[in-house]
Image (spheres, coloured by chain):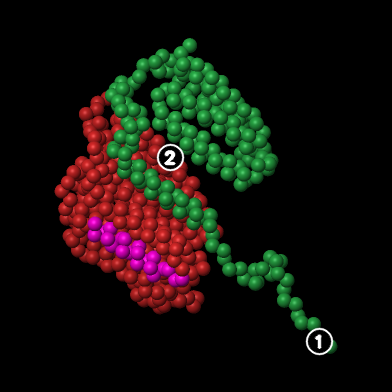
Chain colours: A green, B red
């Protein structure tokens, strides 16, 4: 057994176990942590497949940033709040089963077609990757696609401003009449006639 | 491949983004009365960007720069100038709305409007479908927020509706981009054209892509049957934002449509022109008929906007320089008419968003003859009566459609125009021949009047002397790639 295979057979079961654990855990925080385990193991797979850049991105972006955001949202919404299991739309459950079955079949077909495919590198793969995979990606990203790359950052600025504008409503001056109507303030009492 | 770092064709966008960021920082740091400074910064950004755009008219470099992402042809220049003009008027109207109701005002209005403008000027110049998509998202996101900015119920509801349907249409567009990449192996529009030209036989993937892209852009230009969001959003949004987006979004999305279809998918034009003709027919009929039933002026103008999208699509059925030129002229004329009419809607009463029903127009002539005259001019132009820009524009698109063999479409367009004339004449009758019933006062503020005057001047000048711009439009309609 080569070193590659050894690493694979150590991390693949952990990845599967992490995924199953995520599905089965009742606690949302535990589920998120199981997902982190799974994402880390997948990152190792990328390293095995000679994609070091993807390995780093997977850990930094997915296992790091996105999972922290997940946890933030879970904490903000309340960890122990029970989920509403009623179905607002009828027929969602059978539909989900059918679609899941179709997805499994699709994956099976794709895997069947892919067997033997992965043993050979795509045409021109080595020429593109001659200075290393990360450098090849950088060349495409910052030369051919540098304007889309920059416009994406503009899009993120707009999204951030948009989110803040919508979420952060300026506190409106509340009039006394409104407070009275809401029962937060007692109506002005008439002065008791002094003896 | 090293990119040619020729940033000159990208300067308008750089200027706009810089002005927007200055505005954001100012909003965050400054205290006290801020709107005059905001307005000055934003207007300066738009004027400088317009200057930079004008300088591109005689640009002699490559057809596309920045690694094939930005086109440098005159279509980009003319469409950008139209968008910037709309943004100029939108800023004047928005500032007035803020002055009138300071409690609901948000300083972020100015940077967001500039971001929307950036997305629009970028999309008209984008020569790569990825940049088209990103620009579409920049402009859409900004517009969703601008729509919901006042925080009133109607505005928030309109904003949410716009967001949901807009995200849906973006997905269609993105799916179309993926199909194009599958069919041709590239997302650069000129390269797509080259890849499709020499191809014989199976074009299924490319045709699917054309249909998906048409749906995605059809949402943005509010062509029927993808117009569902238009009346609700136009009515719910602040009138100043409605004025800006009804004009500028249409120009931006149509310019992108022209570049994607008349450059990228040119080889398939026998397949997609019937689709465009069908969209045009449905839009023209539905928009004109549904406008009749409306009791709210903003809804009425929204349905009229659907009909006008149909007229512009009518011109695009002729996939040649004539058709593109006619559509460009229509876009310029329509921008002036729609901004002008929404500007009038904003100042007809001092009560702003609360009174946009037709009753507010009873006897407007007695109250404010200038305003009534301007509104009448815009409505006559929307109906397509000479001597206004709307008439010349309609003649142009119908001529192009007939030249391309779509005589039935031109006939349908003329019939729909006659039906739609009832809608506009009804308002004119209310304004001039009916006595006012309520004691309403029109808003005398100067800023909207400037926007109204600009719109009226363009409508009249283009109607009386269309020769002034026909040469410009004709040279912009020759796509360089």
Direction from residue B98 to residue B183 in the image, left or right: left
Decide if residue B18 is on the left or right side of residue A28.
Answer: left
Q: Which residue matches tag 2?
A: B171
Task: Identify the residue shown where x is 17% and y is 55%.
Answer: B471
Q: Residue B34 location in percent, x, y?
A: 43, 68
Q: Main secondary structure of the magenta part?
A: helix
Chain letter of the residue carrying label 2: B
What residue sits 40% from the left and 27% below the top? A51
- Secondary structure, mark 1, is loop
For the record, the magenta segment spans B32-52
Residue B148: say if magenta: no
Q: Residue at x 56, y 20 (%)?
A: A13
Q: Is residue B340 above or below residue B283?
A: below
Q: Is residue A41 above or below residue B387?
A: above
- Numbered tag placed on residue A194 in the rendering: 1
The image quadrant where one finds the N terminus of chain B is top left
**Residue A84 at x, y percent in the picture:** 67, 40
């Amino acid at each position: 057994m080569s070193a590659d295979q050894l690493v694979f057979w150590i991390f693949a079961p952990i990845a599967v176990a992490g995924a199953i654990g995520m599905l089965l855990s009742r606690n949302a925080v535990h589920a998120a942590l199981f997902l982190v385990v799974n994402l880390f193991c997948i990152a190792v797979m990328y390293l095995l497949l000679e994609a070091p850049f993807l390995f780093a991105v997977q850990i930094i972006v997915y296992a790091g940033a996105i999972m922290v955001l997940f946890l933030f949202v879970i904490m903000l919404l309340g960890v122990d709040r029970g989920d509403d299991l009623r179905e607002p739309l009828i027929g969602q459950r059978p539909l989900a089963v059918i679609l899941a079955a179709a997805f499994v079949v699709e994956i099976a077909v794709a895997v069947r077609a892919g067997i033997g495919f992965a043993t050979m590198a795509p045409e021109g793969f080595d020429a593109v990757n001659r200075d290393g995979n990360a450098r090849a990606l950088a060349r495409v990203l910052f030369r051919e696609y540098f304007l889309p790359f920059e416009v994406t950052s503009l899009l993120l600025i707009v999204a951030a401003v948009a989110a803040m504008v919508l979420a952060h409503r300026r506190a409106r001056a509340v009039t006394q009449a409104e407070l009275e109507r809401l029962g937060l303030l007692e109506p002005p009492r008439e002065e008791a006639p002094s003896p | 491949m090293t990119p040619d770092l020729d940033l000159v064709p990208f300067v308008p966008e750089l200027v706009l983004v810089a002005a927007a960021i200055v505005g954001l920082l100012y909003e965050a740091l400054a205290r006290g009365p801020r709107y005059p400074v905001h307005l000055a910064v934003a207007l300066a950004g738009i004027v400088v960007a317009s200057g930079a755009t004008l300088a591109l008219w005689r640009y002699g470099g490559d057809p596309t720069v920045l690694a094939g992402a930005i086109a440098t042809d005159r279509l980009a220049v003319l469409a950008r100038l139209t968008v910037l003009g709309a943004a100029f008027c939108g800023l004047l109207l928005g500032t007035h709305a803020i002055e009138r109701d300071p409690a609901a005002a948000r300083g972020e209005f100015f940077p967001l409007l500039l971001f929307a403008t950036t997305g629009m000027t970028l999309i008209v110049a984008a020569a790569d479908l990825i940049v088209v998509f990103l620009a579409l998202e920049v402009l859409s996101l900004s517009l969703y927020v601008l729509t919901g900015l006042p925080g009133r119920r109607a505005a928030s509801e309109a904003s949410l509706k716009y967001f949901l349907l807009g995200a849906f249409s973006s997905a269609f567009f993105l799916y179309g981009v993926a199909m194009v990449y599958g069919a041709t192996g590239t997302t650069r529009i000129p390269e797509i054209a080259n890849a499709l030209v020499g191809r014989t036989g199976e074009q299924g993937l490319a045709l699917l892509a054309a249909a998906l892209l048409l749906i995605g852009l059809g949402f943005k230009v509010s062509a029927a049957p993808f117009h569902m969001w238009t009346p609700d959003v136009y009515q719910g949004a602040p009138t100043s934002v409605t004025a800006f987006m009804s004009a500028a979004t249409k120009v931006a999305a149509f310019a992108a449509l022209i570049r994607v279809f008349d450059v990228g998918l040119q080889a398939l034009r026998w397949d997609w022109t019937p689709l465009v003709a069908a969209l045009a027919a449905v839009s023209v009929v539905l928009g004109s008929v549904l406008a009749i039933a409306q009791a709210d002026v903003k809804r009425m103008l929204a349905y009229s906007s659907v009909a006008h999208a149909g007229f512009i699509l009518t011109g695009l059925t002729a996939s040649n320089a004539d058709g593109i030129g006619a559509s460009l002229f229509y876009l310029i004329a329509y921008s002036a008419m729609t901004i002008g009419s929404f500007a009038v809607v904003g100042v007809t009463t001092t009560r702003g968003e609360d009174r946009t029903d037709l009753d507010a127009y009873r006897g407007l002539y007695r109250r404010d003859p200038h305003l009534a005259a301007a509104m009448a001019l815009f409505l006559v132009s929307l109906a397509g009566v000479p001597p206004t820009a709307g008439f010349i524009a309609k003649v142009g698109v119908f001529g192009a459609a007939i030249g391309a063999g779509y005589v039935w479409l031109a006939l349908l367009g003329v019939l729909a125009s006659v039906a739609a004339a009832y809608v506009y004449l009804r308002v004119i009758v209310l304004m001039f021949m009916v006595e006012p019933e309520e004691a309403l006062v029109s808003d005398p503020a100067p800023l909207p009047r400037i926007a109204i005057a600009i719109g009226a001047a363009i409508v009249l000048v283009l109607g009386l002397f269309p020769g002034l711009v026909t040469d410009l439009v004709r040279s912009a309609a020759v796509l360089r790639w």
